[in-house]
Amino acid sequence: MSKGWRKMLLLSVRDGYSQLSAYERKRLKNITENAKFFAALKLHESAARLHQIATKRQSHVTKRYQDSLNSMVLSEDNIKKVVKYRVCSMAIHPSESIIFVAAGDKSGQIGLWNVNCKSEEGAPVFIPHSYSVSCMHFSPFNPAHLLSVSNESLRCGDVTRAVFDEICRSEERLSSFDFLEDNASTAIVGHWDGNVAVVDRRTPGTSSELSADIGFKRTRTVHVHPVKKQYFVAAGAVDVCIYDVRYLKSNGNTPVSSLKGHTRSVASAYFSPVTGNRVVTVCADDKLRVYDTTSLSSAVAVLSTIRHNSNTGRWLTRFRAIWDPKQEDCFVVGSMARPRQIQVFQDTGKLLHSFYNLDCLSSVCSINVVHPSKNILVGGNSSGRLHVFKE
């Protein structure tokens, strides 16, 4: 806490609120309420336990999984406006004791929603960034740490203290990141101008260890292989390629594999969660593609292609297809279809389920996140609202 805030707190104790301006009183009240909120969060589960939760996954679609999808419903009580503007990224905490979701919007706000808390104080909002929060992850090593990236910086937020420390700052606009190790000490970071960078949190300062030109005009997402951590997939423009981080250099980088066939810009590419033997992509050519990455050869084969309207326009965040972390071969993606819905596909291209509610869901949920162990799906829309489907 800064000296100014210490002084203000001392003033409030010694002389009461009479010495504070209306603005300072409101800020002090917010700090007190946030402290109570974070103290009530049960984020004490060990990192080892949460890692065990996150890696306890199934490899095939079963009737039980299909039944669990059918059991997940949306009610008015589980809809909340968490941030002011369009949701650009989300992360869900792996805790099994609470439902805790983070949402980042286009203005730099991050809202933290304790879904179990039904009072107005259940979703404090912070502004750690000045631009769109394009990617967020809870640390697999420290349950209280939420990392987020915006154009100007990568930050680590300690949600129990409501402090967002800067890890990396760059004049090149940042777009996405993923952890290279389970201890979250290093990360691969994507840049909007196409480069990628390696960041080591243990190194003093806010500069990256390496900036590498991978030949992309734009890099929208980066994602690390769940098993072979040296590999990461990068997506942007019409390019989707897999690289080996051990051989990255400033220039002249050659991909390990290329995932070809995209004719327009690619919004995202992610490895499947158990083995990494699949990659799903979303492309502006109105197709979802699943690639077989079992063998990382120079050219990777397409396993399935799914027609999917990805014309979100300028007012909606672009769709990203994300794997259900509990399933090796099922992924979730938003939809432009009516009634408004969130779709679940198998890697074969089969539509398994559509989440919708005619009374409660009337907007497009571009960004979605799935809990790693519980039957919970959260969808975020263009007005900052989150929708929680659960049993």
Image (cartoon, rainbow, N blue to C red):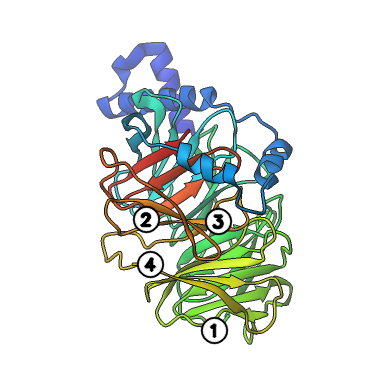
Of residues 249 and 353, which is closer to you in this image? 353
Which of the two discs, 4 and 3, labels the residue nearer the N terminus? Answer: 4
Q: Label 1: few (<14), some or many (≥20) within 10 Å?
A: some
Quarter of the image for residue 115 reads: top left
Residue 250 percent location from the top left of the image: 63, 80
The answer to whether residue 173 is left or right of residue 373 is: left
Contact? badges 4 and 1 (CB < 8 Å): no
For numbered disc 4, what is the local secondary structure?
loop
Q: Label 3: few (<14), some or many (≥20) within 10 Å?
A: many
Question: Which is in the foreground here, disc 4 or disc 2?
Answer: 4
Which of the two discs, 1 and 2, labels the residue nearer the N terminus? Answer: 1
Q: Amino acid at mark 2?
A: Ser
For numbered disc 2, what is the local secondary structure?
loop
For numbered disc 3, what is the local secondary structure?
strand
Name the residue tied to disc 1: 215
Name the residue tied to disc 3: 330
Which of the two discs, 4 and 2, labels the residue nearer the N terminus? Answer: 4
Which of the two discs, 3 and 1, labels the residue nearer the N terminus? Answer: 1
Residue 186 percent location from the top left of the image: 67, 58
Task: Give the alpha-carbon distance from disc 3 to disc 1, as whole Å.
Answer: 31 Å
Name the residue tied to disc 4: 308
Q: State whether residue 386 is above or below residue 27.
A: below
Tell me which residue sits at (70%, 34%) in the image.
46
The answer to whether residue 76 is left or right of residue 374 is: left
Residue 85 percent location from the top left of the image: 29, 49
Tell me which residue sits at (60%, 79%) in the image.
301
Contact? badges 4 and 2 (CB < 8 Å): no
Name the residue tied to disc 2: 366
Task: Give the alpha-carbon distance from disc 1 to disc 2, as whole Å.
Answer: 28 Å
Q: Amino acid at mark 1?
A: Gly
